[in-house]
């Protein structure tokens, strides 16, 4: 089977929050309005992560992340840094700045 015919299979992991109550008290505002959600999340710098599972307060909109969500956020940050580095390198090459040695 060629690689063009293979399909990526996402292995579904059980939610780490399956045994928690559906609604809990928000540590930020103290209201009982913290709920599990799985929806798009916009990072402070504007990047969008689709379907990120987390707790979100429906009152103050604070977000709380488990280890799995933090890994996704950290991976997104690594990719952004890598992309910025590639762009900076291209800009230097385009400007005729070449680093030799090392």
Image (spheres, grey):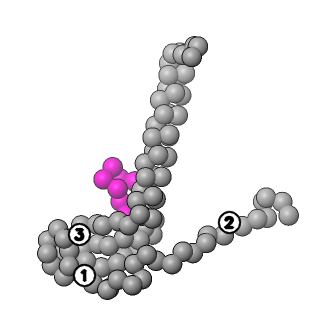
Q: Which mark is residue 48?
A: none
- Judge from the rendering whether residue 91 lies leftward or rightward of residue 6; answer left or right: left
Which residue: 51% across, 15% down? 97
Q: Secondary structure at mark 1?
A: strand
Structural distance between the alpha carbons of marks 3 and 2? 34 Å
Q: Main secondary structure of the magenta part?
A: loop
- Neighbourhood count class around disc 1 (C-alpha, 10 Å): few under 14, some 14–19, many 20 upward: some
Q: Disc 3 or 2, which lies upstream in sequence?
A: 2
According to the image, label 2 marks what residue?
Answer: 8
Q: Nearer the viewer, mark 2 or mark 1?
A: 1
The spot of residue 62 in percent (x, y) is 24, 67
- Neighbourhood count class around disc 2 (C-alpha, 10 Å): few under 14, some 14–19, many 20 upward: few
Q: In the rendered image, which quarter is residue 27 located in?
A: bottom left
Residue interval drawn in magenta: 41-47
Quarter of the image that includes the N terminus: bottom right
Q: Disc 2 or 1, which lies upstream in sequence?
A: 2
The spot of residue 15 in percent (x, y) is 46, 77
Tell how many labels.
3
Outermost residue on the left side: it is 30
Which residue: 17% across, 68% down? 28
Quarter of the image that includes the C terminus: top right
Q: Nearer the viewer, mark 1 or mark 3?
A: 1
According to the image, label 3 marks what residue?
Answer: 61
């Amino acid at each position: 089977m060629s690689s063009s015919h293979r399909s990526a299979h996402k292995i579904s992991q059980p939610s780490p929050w399956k045994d928690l109550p559906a609604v809990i008290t928000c540590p930020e505002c103290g209201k009982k309005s913290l709920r599990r959600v799985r929806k798009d999340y916009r990072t402070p710098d504007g990047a969008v992560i689709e379907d990120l599972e987390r707790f979100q307060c429906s009152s103050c909109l604070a977000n709380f992340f488990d280890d799995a969500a933090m890994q996704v956020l950290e991976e997104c940050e690594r990719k952004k840094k890598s992309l910025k580095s590639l762009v900076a390198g291209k800009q230097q090459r385009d400007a005729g700045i070449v680093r030799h040695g090392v």
